[in-house]
Image (tube, rainbow, N blue to C red):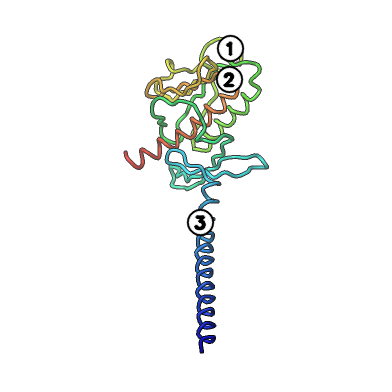
Amino acid sequence: MVKKESKNKQDNKAIKKSIKWFLILLVIFFIVYFATPKIIKEIKTVEYGNLTFTKTKFQDIPVYYYWYNLVSSSGEISRYNLYLRENPQENPVLVTGEIEYPKAGSKIYVSLNDSSVSKECTNLNREMLTLGIFLKGNMYDFKLVYPDNETATKNSGIIANCQNRPKNMVIEIAQTNRTIIERVNENCYKLEFNTCKDLLYVIEKFEVQTLIDAKNRSLYG
């Protein structure tokens, strides 16, 4: 009789131990099942401002991706895909003033002081093209111009700057001793970069800040 009771106690202990391990494994399973997708999502996404970028690859190039819808004056909806080469969280460019655009379809002058740009900046055309694609993709008619008579004559272009085009949006771009995006007046913005690499940072920050400010106006304006 004693042996039987002892055996029953051992069986009960074994059962309790099995149940305990089953519950532990069940808890681990739920943690892994529900937490892993969230962890993976956090690794693959980057939050900046009020935007969520997805870290992905575009033709084997690591990029940060964000998309949004645009509505034309006729009511047609289109989608714009924004790709950044740099992490927006780590972009150090300072922005002073809110970035605001005229009505869709308005002309925007991109005024490049190319005489200030070092010949070492072989990325100049690429970054200018990036800005042009962004403006065109957001339904703006943009024109590449020059800030003074010297650079305009050299490039057989026209002159447009913050002074002589007060009613149009003007984006002046020049290489200086600082890296900053500055709103000069109601319609004028100066994009200054120090090193050649900084030009990429300036262009991408201008694009991202454009979206952040526009979204803030729609939410809180």
Residue on which disc 3 sits: 35
Q: Is residue 56 left or right of residue 79?
A: right
Q: At 58% from the left edge and 32% from the top edge, which residue is drawn?
A: 130
State yes or no: discs 3 and 2 in contact (Cβ < 8 Å). no
Residue furthest to the front in view is: 2
Q: Nearer the viewer, mark 3 or mark 2?
A: 3
Amino acid at circle 1: Thr
Amino acid at circle 2: Thr
| Nearest to the observer: residue 181 or residue 102 | 181
Which element carries disc 3, helix, strand or loop?
helix
Total residue callouts: 3
Q: CA distance from mark 3 to mark 1?
A: 62 Å
Q: Which mark is residue 103?
A: none
| Nearest to the observer: residue 161 or residue 184 | 184
The quadrant of the image that shows the C terminus is top left
Q: Nearer the viewer, mark 3 or mark 1?
A: 3
Q: Where in the figure is residue 20, as x and y percent of width and height? A: 50, 70
Which element carries disc 2, helix, strand or loop?
loop
Residue on which disc 2 sits: 195
